[in-house]
Image (cartoon, coloured by chain):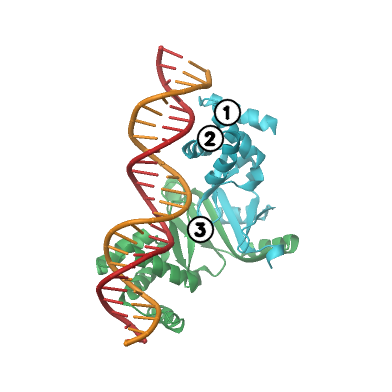
Chain colours: A green, B cyan, C red, D orange
Amino acid sequence: MQNKFDNYCELLQKESYKITPQRQIILKTLLDHAEKHLSAEELHYIVKQKDPEIGLATIYRTLEIFDNLNILHKIDFGDGCIRYEFTDQDAHTHHHLICIKCGRVIEVNDDLLETLETWIEKRTQFHITDHQLKFFGYCKNCQ
Amino acid sequence: MQNKFDNYCELLQKESYKITPQRQIILKTLLDHAEKHLSAEELHYIVKQKDPEIGLATIYRTLEIFDNLNILHKIDFGDGCIRYEFTDQDAHTHHHLICIKCGRVIEVNDDLLETLETWIEKRTQFHITDHQLKFFGYCKNCQ
DNA sequence: CTTACTGCAAATCTTTTGCAACGTC
DNA sequence: GACGTTGCAAAAGATTTGCAGTAAG
């Protein structure tokens, strides 16, 4: 985990962004909760426990930068706020199961979609660069 | 198209919603632009040309009802507003190609996802009731 | 005539922006 | 020391809600 942190800091530096304490705290927090798909608000709540001074605007601005640098990307689970996920986690073959009762988000990996993608590209002349696949239903506990 | 309109009106009636002129105009407009995935704002703009009195709140309230009755459902193309699509159009085997340059939304049909769904259900014990698959990339014109 | 529906305005919620003060490099 | 970054407060944009008046059944 530490090396990820360092890598992302290097990337920031390389792109001439400054390594501020705020950005370090935010990045650490994101890494610590990588599987949680935090929203800006949730992230802010956690971050404030480490440094109560940090404002919500800084959270949004930092997430924006991380998104631009492709460190993470936005996902929407339909709950009214934007959530974030590390891009390196994605690997293009990773989907989400969203429980419509308890809201739990489960991740699944597969590569069946590759086939579909190739087929669609051939048929529609649309050049696909990314996809999002979400399944809605009931998780094991909520059935 | 007329029979769809009548069917949905019947459904409204059956669920003891009143068939008001506003709801009729909204429903007609939605049916006329079924392939457009209108947002509330866009819908309002069109509807106001037929009846300038209709307020945006009515649009939202009507869309809410239609969503609850499963006449249509929300989709999010990541452009900051909720869009709507008729549920009967979906047929569970219909996906969206979203051009990240011009924003055009193209629809594709396929049933390859069925296989994947069955496989996931078996493996994760998650009961899938719906899915959303979006592909991002460049359309023919924007490549 | 009852009860749901409407339009308006105000409220809410998430996200963005302007700006003066601040901190990194 | 320059310039990017921050916190705050205000703004913006989408959606919701309260309310008094209106209309469908």
Give residue A3's quadrant in the image: bottom left
Q: Answer few, some or many: residues within 10 Å of disc 2's Cα (few below 14, many 20 plus, some between 14 and 19).
A: some
- The amino acid marked with disc number 1 is Leu
Give percent across and percent down for residue C9. 38, 38
Q: Tell me the residue that label 3 is attached to.
A: A96
Label 1, label 3: how many angstroms apart (C-alpha)?
A: 33 Å
Q: Is residue A132 left or right of residue B3?
A: left
Give percent across and percent down for residue A133. 56, 58
- The amino acid marked with disc number 3 is His
User: Is residue A16 positioned above or below B125 on the image?
Assistant: below
In front here: B120 or B84? Answer: B84
Label 3, label 2: how many angstroms apart (C-alpha)?
A: 26 Å
Residue displayed at 35% across by 59% down: A42
Residues under numbered marks 2 and 1 in contact, where contact means CB atoms less than 8 Å apart: yes
Residue displayed at 46% across by 38% down: B57
In front here: A15 or B124? Answer: A15
- The amino acid marked with disc number 2 is Leu
Give residue B27's quadrant in the image: top right
Q: Which chain's residue wears label 3?
A: A
- Please tell me which of labels 2 and 1 falls first in the chain: 1
Q: Tell me the residue that label 2 is attached to.
A: B69
- Note whether residue A118 is visible: no
Q: In this view, does A91 lie to the left or right of C13?
A: right
Q: Tell me the residue that label 1 is attached to.
A: B11
